[in-house]
Amino acid sequence: MDPVHDPAFVQLLTPEGRRVDHPKFAYTGDDASVAAHLRAMVLARRLDAEATALQRKGELALWPPMLGQEAAQVGSASAVGPLDEVIPSYREHAVALAMGVAPLDLLKTFRGTHMVDWDSRALRFHLYSFVIGTQALHATGMAMGMRFDGLVGNADPAANGAAMVYFGDGATSQGDVSEAFVFAASYTAPLVLFCQNNQWAISVPIARQSKIPLYQRASGFGIPAVQVDGNDVLAVQAVTEWALDRARRGEGPTFIEAFTYRMGAHTTSDDPTKYRGRDEEASWRAKDPIARVRAYLRSTGAIDDTWEGHLANESDALAERLRDEVVSLPEPVLADWFTRGYVRTPQALLAQREEFVAYEASFVEEATA
Amino acid sequence: MSPTTMTLAKALNAGLRRSLEADPKVLLMGEDIGRLGGVFRVTEGLQADFGPDRVMDSPLAESAIVGTAVGLALRGYRPVVEIQFDGFVFPAFDQLTTQVSRLRFRSHGRLSVPLVVRIPYGGGIGAIEHHSESPEAYFAHTPGLKVVTVSTPSDAYWGIQQAIASDDPVIFLEPKRRYYARGEVDGGGVPGPLHAARVARPGTDATLIAYGPMVQTCLDAAEAAAAEGHQLEVLDLRSLSPLDDAAIIASVERTGRCIVVHEAVRSGGLGAEIAARVSEACFLSLEAPVLRVTAYDIPYPPAKAEHAYLPDVDRVLDAVDRSMAY
């Protein structure tokens, strides 16, 4: 079903770049803010393309491309406030950048040199999660804690915060995600459950996973829901701001289904030609999240060739720096990892570390003997 | 089928195909196993040939995959489910340990769960987190489950069919780093029993006990040791629950030395169980303590450190030297 004909579907910027009104939601930013979104989306897409290329050259072990989901991520991330917590899945590269994760840190995990090497507490952007749906419960618990800590419903909006968790359409089949809906509703958790429905769980289409539009599931849990054009950065921001504000006011969780499309493979190990047609990809290419913003800003005169030229240079510089940095990452040293599993490393594990270090050293001795 | 050389993945595919042909009650279910043929292509072409009702692409939910397979099994089907990666089996852990393993016991022996859970497992492929785990000890520690693994295309071809024929539930562990290793499969050959160990290389000086991905590592170590005059026996366990005690004891009594090698972490692993059994049964034959060559007791590290984390030929030979020097 094409949700554009669903009256509940929120769209504020058409694929052609035309602003349209919605009875409930409006984008309140000016064109400079829209241009900032364009910049964020272009840079994120460039990072994504560069990471994909680095994997092809053997410099990354794997990369889950975000191509096509820039608006869902940039739009939602732009609604995040200074006390909010963001709990990602593993494809939220544009959200990561918006939350201050260094591009190199994002790639470290996928080069295989690090686990997840950003300061999740300082950035309020938590660890990527690779077991599908597990993070939904963590986010719910964090939101419960924020409520217990008095971070919701304060008269001063600046004293309020909420949590937002990202997951995909595939994750909605996991028990953990349904359980998160139950707990979030039970405890009036200040939580936004943000689902990027990119239509495919690797090779399994959304039709196999749900017989109704995903957003309609939420009502069964007593959670209000919105389906938004996930390729419309303005609509996504407007909807997410509303949902986060509800949460911060103490009105409980909201489910957002951002209707979008994974233009690339599930990961660089995947081959989508085995399970989906080019026609489908082409129809979504026509709804590109970046093209419509560019068309709009060109039509208003807010951006011109000079502006885009600067952005292209910035984008090239990002890619170049990333290439250099990634190949220079040091190899991990196993001995370092023995003391990272516990607050206080047990004696027996320290002994294993000594055994390992002595064993490694024996090769050096042999080589120098 | 005349003797053919094929990869371990292809051998599994051929074995699954034969089971699907032989018994209309055999069903396959899992994430991406149908149209895509599985992320490792083990089920490639099976949905096209047997239809989407017998080779089912499931929604993304491992607990549901295993839990509904229990119901199918109770209705007389023989489900063969795939967990996409080792690290993703844990959402199904409740079903496996509290239900699959116990339905027979709870029903006073009236019910059977003829279910096979295929799990690609182990590391060495440069993967990201949760894609290189060796969870076998959890399942071997669970009474009511059978746990088997394979190290050769021939065992893969026969083992998967034997597992499907088993009336008890089987955790079927597939060493993903050996999926593309080639070997001969003789479709006319009579297979050994599912739970029998196999002497992969005879020897006299020490027994290397291994399974799955580490069998080849131990064979390589035995080859290297032979050049230095040590004849190592390599015992491929094939079955982790039940263990083939007779084969383990016979080998260790012959060689007097025992080294267990596995990718899983050391503490509470299969090596500990085997060491206990060997010390109980072969105490007077032992020339040295049973040694273990395993991963260290930390979670799986970043992939670029896995070479130091996993047992390799050098670490096996180091243990052989220590055993010999004892």
Image (cartoon, helix red, strand yellow):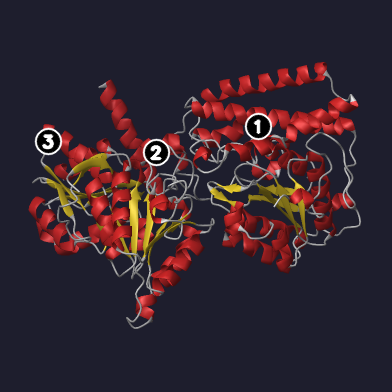
A159 sits left or right of B278 in the view: right
Front-lying residue, A332 or B18: B18
Q: Residue placed at 12% from the left, 35% from the top?
A: B226
Q: Residue placed at 46% from the left, 46% from the top?
A: B36
Q: Is residue A84 visible?
A: no
Structural crowding at the residue carrying mark 2, measured as other residues with C-alpha within 10 Å and reported as few (<14), some (14–19) or many (≥20)? some
Of marks 3 and 2, the one in the foreground: 2
Structural crowding at the residue carrying mark 1, measured as other residues with C-alpha within 10 Å and reported as few (<14), some (14–19) or many (≥20)? few
- Amino acid type of the residue tagged 1 in the rendering: Ala
Chain to which the residue tagged by mark 2 belongs: B
Front-lying residue, B215 or B260: B215
Q: Which residue carries the number 2 mark?
A: B125
Q: Is A317 located above or below residue A168 in the figure?
A: above
Q: Are marks 1 and 2 on the same chain?
A: no
Q: Earlier in the sequence, mark 3 or mark 2?
A: 2
For the residues labelled 3 and 1, the Cα–Cα distance comes to: 52 Å
A86 sits left or right of B132 in the view: right
Q: Residue placed at 39% from the left, 56% from the top?
A: B50
Structural crowding at the residue carrying mark 3, measured as other residues with C-alpha within 10 Å and reported as few (<14), some (14–19) or many (≥20)? few
Q: Which residue carries the number 1 mark?
A: A102
Q: Which residue carries the number 3 mark?
A: B226
Secondary structure beneath dot 2 equals: loop
B211 sits left or right of B126 in the view: left
Q: Are marks 1 and 2 in contact (CB under 8 Å)?
A: no
Across and down, in percent, residue B287 comes to 12, 51
